[in-house]
Image: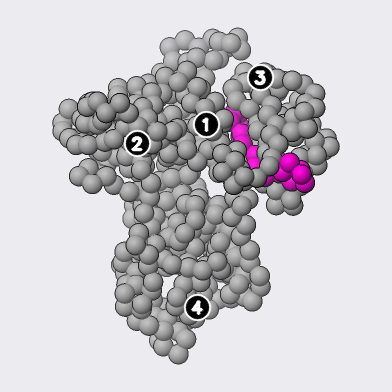
Amino acid sequence: MAKQFDVIVIGGGPGGYIAAIRAAQLGMKVACVDEWKNAEGGPAPGGTCTNVGCIPSKALLQSSEHFEHAAHHFADHGIEVKGLGLNLGKMLARKDAVVRQNNDGILYLLKKNKVGFFHGRAAFVKAADAGVYDITIASATPEVIQGKHIVLATGSRARALPGAAFDEINVLSNDGALRLGTVPATLGLIGSGVIGLEMGSVWRRLGSRVTVLEALPTFLGAVDEQIAKEARKAFDRQGLKVELGAQVGDIQSGPDGVRVAYTNAKGEQQSLSVDKLIISIGRVPNTEGLNAAAVGLELDANGAIVVDDACKTNLPNVWAVGDVVRGPMLAHKAEEEGVAVAERIAGQHGHVNFNTIPWVIYTSPEIAWVGQTEQQLKAAGRAYRAGTFPFLANGRARALGDTTGMVKMLADATTDEILGVHIVGPMASELIAECVVAMEFRASSEDIARICHAHPSLSEATKEAALAVDRRALNF
């Protein structure tokens, strides 16, 4: 007889394993099925985020930043480095070790919470029979398990350019970009999104000459315009070449590298020859192999699973979260949806506030934001006040030797409620958390301005930006 569960979660990424753990905490019998494999063929839960995304990229960003500091900035601190060298193999091995630690940590958490873990590829067998779904698991030992509720958390994969399939040798997705065995002398990037800029930053620091081709006429169009301009200036100073309005045409890959034909913003035919090319033009949801048609699971034109505001699909007791549904493809968004769905299954009132989901780009300088941008507020005709404070005037930033960027706060002109906060500069990924909390509690800029912040700290820049909304910054 097939093993029976209250909840079966398909996918062990951030949305999946978190949903499984929360459901188990709420007293349900839970299974989690995941097909990711490590180098030895064993289980490697954590999804794209842990295996070829968030975690390994941050490990390489940290390592490459150390390398750049040693090469260019240690001397400012009176630290003399002679004979600096790069052991890329060891750097990549450290990255792999960090990934493995996270894989093992997730397996431990599932076991600790008594979640049944199955290593293999899961799919529907047929429509529910008496309220129970049969899920087949393709693995070394195939089996069928049964569940009353199914949570689909199958994630996403890199979108390829037509005519330029990923070979992960010359034409790279985020996966291949994390596994280059040597530092390419020249590196091309198609797309200036989060993944592209982060990977471009890693290899630029390690010695590559990086060129970014972006089809849009604006840089980081989703980011507040003032913040994006500040970031662009920093990247220009670093030597990261960004060409906007580039319409990519034919891509030829061969033993000598990759040649990209494109039209620039002026309509002129151009050609870019590089050793390696990273394509970062977005991601597509993973729904292939679920056997969706057999059960009538509704998908949209892009292959994403159609859900309502509660993450319910068109099938009874079938839910979906994370990259495989609408909304931003962010690991922490998936986690929040996973928790909310588990609580809804348990009869509670899970909730996700899309207006307070933070965004982060882990370049140097880091870029982070929450809420609305100034251009969005203008387009909506909403009256607002803005306050900015530069890290140049922050004592802790001076001590760190990193004064690039600013904090920008936007508040309603009448109520003073914080509508958005945008940061470019050191540790922006950490500083944004205070702003998320403030917005979740519908705080005013005055609330932040009145809170005592430690001195010296980078967080003082947030307080000063809040003071600047009322034109009363104290240190600038």
The residue positioned 35% from the left and 48% from the top of the image is 158
Disc 3 is placed on an element classified as helix
Q: Which residues are magenta?
A: 411-429
Looking at the image, tell me whether mark 4 or mark 2 is earlier in sequence order: 2
Q: Nearer the viewer, residue 111 or 368?
A: 368
Q: Secondary structure at mark 2?
A: loop
Amino acid at pointer 4: Asn
Against 417, residue 9 (above or below) is below
- The residue sitting at 76% across, 44% down in the picture is 414
Q: Amino acid at mark 1?
A: Ala
Q: Which residue is mark 3?
A: 392
Q: Which residue is mark 2?
A: 215
- Tell me the distance, in whole angstroms, between the alpha carbons under discs 4 and 1: 43 Å
* Quadrant occupied by the C terminus: top right
Q: Secondary structure at mark 4?
A: loop
Q: Is residue 168 magenta?
A: no
